[in-house]
Amino acid sequence: MLTPSDRQKLDSIENNEAETSRFFFRKGLQDVEAHPRQFIIDGLRKNLAAFNWLPSHRRSLLIDLANFFSFGPVMLFGLWGMFRHRAHWREDCLIYLFFLTFMLITGIFWAHTSHRVYLDVYWIAFGSEVFAEKLFPLFRDPRRKRSIAQLASARVAHLWMLRPKGVREAPYKHGWPSVDPAELPPFHQEMPPVALFRA
């Protein structure tokens, strides 16, 4: 709150931007010193608003739900991925520093959910590991990884055999890998066997 003397002071320096900025800076420090507990509570509230799953300026119900079901899971899986990756904190410390500085600046000043978007990129990166390893067992089974690679090789070989006449260059310098369709998972055995050759 500005007292009458504060308003007089502001009127006297209204044409001096630097002095006006210093005046509000001093007033802010005085307010923090007088109410430290309230300053911490307000900082937490501003961070909760910035990291909310709903946009900090509410819009229509459809837009709010779109934000909730998009940015919400990104944050959830991102935090899960960060926890799973905690053993590599030395490599990731710069990313953690980005989050820390954002929270500090938000606590002192303010921020909207849109200001947090550059941090969502890191949550997407961390969360992708959780998706790949936990939600998609296909990528977790070494045998299936190998069979998918073999299936891809078989498909490329099949396309190569159907090449137009006159095209003789083999795409693989060292020839084609051998593939046994019997080793593929059941859902891949529908594919007819193809004759593979070496260049």
Image: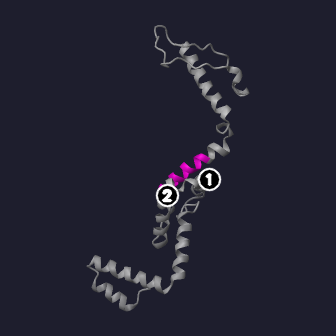
Q: Which residue is mark 1?
A: 84
Point out which mark residue 93 bears: 2
Q: Residue furthest bottom?
A: 5
Residue type at numbered disc 1? Arg
Whether residue 189 is visible: no
Q: Is residue 135 above or below residue 53?
A: above
Where residue 21 appears, as percent x and y from the top left, is: 33, 77
Point out which mark residue 66 bears: none
User: Seen in the image, is 192 located left or right of residue 31?
Assistant: right
| Numbered disc total | 2
- Residue numbers of the magenta segment: 118-129
Identify the residue at horizontal 55%, vertical 72% (top origin).
44
Dots 1 and 2: beta carbons under 8 Å? no
Q: Is residue 35 above or below residue 108?
A: below
Q: Residue furthest left?
A: 15
SS at mark 2 in the image: helix
How many residues crowd mark 1 within 10 Å: few (<14), some (14–19), many (20+)?
A: some
Where residue 192 appears, as percent x and y from the top left, is: 67, 17
Identify the residue at horizontal 32%, vertical 80% (top origin).
20
Identify the residue at horizontal 56%, vertical 50% (top origin).
126
